[in-house]
Amino acid sequence: MTTTVSQELLPTGQSLDAARVEGERAYALDRAHVFHSWSAQEQITPMTILASEGSYVWDGAGNRMLDFSSQLVNTNIGHQHPKVVAAIQDQAAKLCTIAPQYVNDARSEAARLIAERTPGDLNKVFFTNGGADANEHAVRMARLHTGRYKVLSRYRSYHGGTDTAINLTGDPRRWPNDYGNSGVVHFHGPFRYRSQFHSENEQQETERALEHLDQLIRLEGPNSIAAIVLESVPGTAGIMVPPPGYMAGVREICDRYGIVFIADEVMSGFGRTGKWFAIDHFGVVPDLITFAKGVNSGYVPLGGVAISEKIAATFADRPYPGGLTYSGHPLATAAAVATINAMEDERIVENAARIGSEILGPGLRGLADRHPSIGEVRGLGVFWAIELVADRATKEPLAPYGTSSPAMNEVIAACKAGGLLPFANFNRVHAVPPCTVTEAEAREGLAILDTVLDIADAHR
Ligand code: PLP
């Protein structure tokens, strides 16, 4: 899919010089008029992207960069996949928009393809515009289903930027958004490297994390708790793969207390971990799965909630009090149909699993052998994080929790200068390329990281 372009042309065929001029104008207009997410507006210098293809993007100067971020971990199928682009074009020619109360073939087919891939009896799909509103609706469904109000979610999590979703979020982005009346209570999930439970092995971590959750529920009042919301593998917060038995234990706790189990698969779903859903690694069936990003690689905004028969039945004879003008938008769902079919036909989920187990996992562990600034390597599929530390013994992070640091800023800048677009957060660099990444591209990314990590080592 990825082609080499001459110095003069972008993959679109556009001349680089013309694209650069357009890019400069876009940058000036951006700085004048675009208000950016999560940013101090006068302190940012956003990168211009002129073009993209496969695992690469071209920056404002025309430099080709390996996209080891998949943007915000959403381009699972890579950039500009021709089948998805064509499906959007065909759908646009046929029917651009239709309200959610009408039946539409793209929406129906997308719902079927998603329901067939979710575990258990999650057979109904409610479509949203993205991940945050998927979590808003999942929580609303759980509250109406149980008649309870409180919701539990873990620290070190991200669930979105809207009102309930940011309150569910356990990372510092919640802090300025938290007015203390959301009904959300946070708990500690398992995280061996920085264990809250002083456990000595994974089994202890599982047991103690489950005991903590159970105790919290008993103290909060089981009859007041509607749902537990949990990323199957927490992504933005650091790709902490749950230890064996943890997710099954959460399922068991939910069953014991009549609590709805919501698995947030917005980042971990649709092939990212080498299976359709990360929860498939644990053999657990949640009551609701929220998804977005990889469902259509973000080519058109789309998210949703996959709903079990039990929860869906709550709304069989009683209206569900919620909706969105663009729920199941034809362009977005046509892109989802093409994405899922292409992932199946081209064995893209299998590719993610293989690249993870054969190239990225061993490659990153190899970097840890050479670079003492790496405290831990964790992940699976094309979903990896390296945690950078100033001191391996004390695990002092290279940037304190919730902040950046000059050292991390240098590391990120060096990645970009070396031709790699990273996904970085606090003291972590994530290696999260598209699920379509080739062996050669994965090795190219590892080689760039190898060079960059000398800088991190020097900050120890
Ligand atoms: N849930 C998880 C696990 C996410 O990673 C994200 C976004 O990164 C969201 C929810 C929010 O999705 P969106 O930005 O589409 O609203």
Image: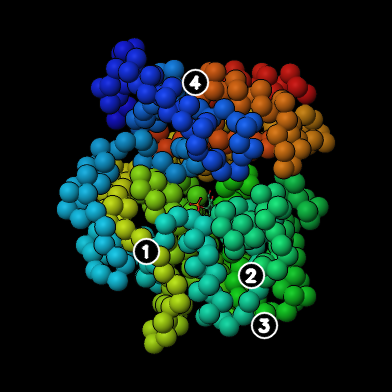
Dot 2 alpha-carbon crowd within 10 angstroms: few under 14, some 14 to 19, many 20 or more: many
Which is more foreground, mark 1 or mark 2? 1
Decide which of tag 1 and tag 2 comes sooner along the chain. 2
Secondary structure at numbered mark 3: helix
Q: Label for residue 173?
A: none
| Quarter residue 400 falls in | top right
Q: Residue at x 55, y 35 (%)?
A: 423
| Quarter residue 435 falls in | top left
The Cα atoms of the two marked residues, 3 and 2, are separated by: 11 Å
Label 4: which residue?
419
Decide which of tag 1 and tag 3 comes sooner along the chain. 3
In the displayed structure image, the side of residue 292 where residue 404 appears, left or right: right
Q: Label for residue 151?
A: 2
Decide which of tag 3 and tag 4 comes sooner along the chain. 3
- 274 over 262 or under it: above or below: above
Label 1: which residue?
325
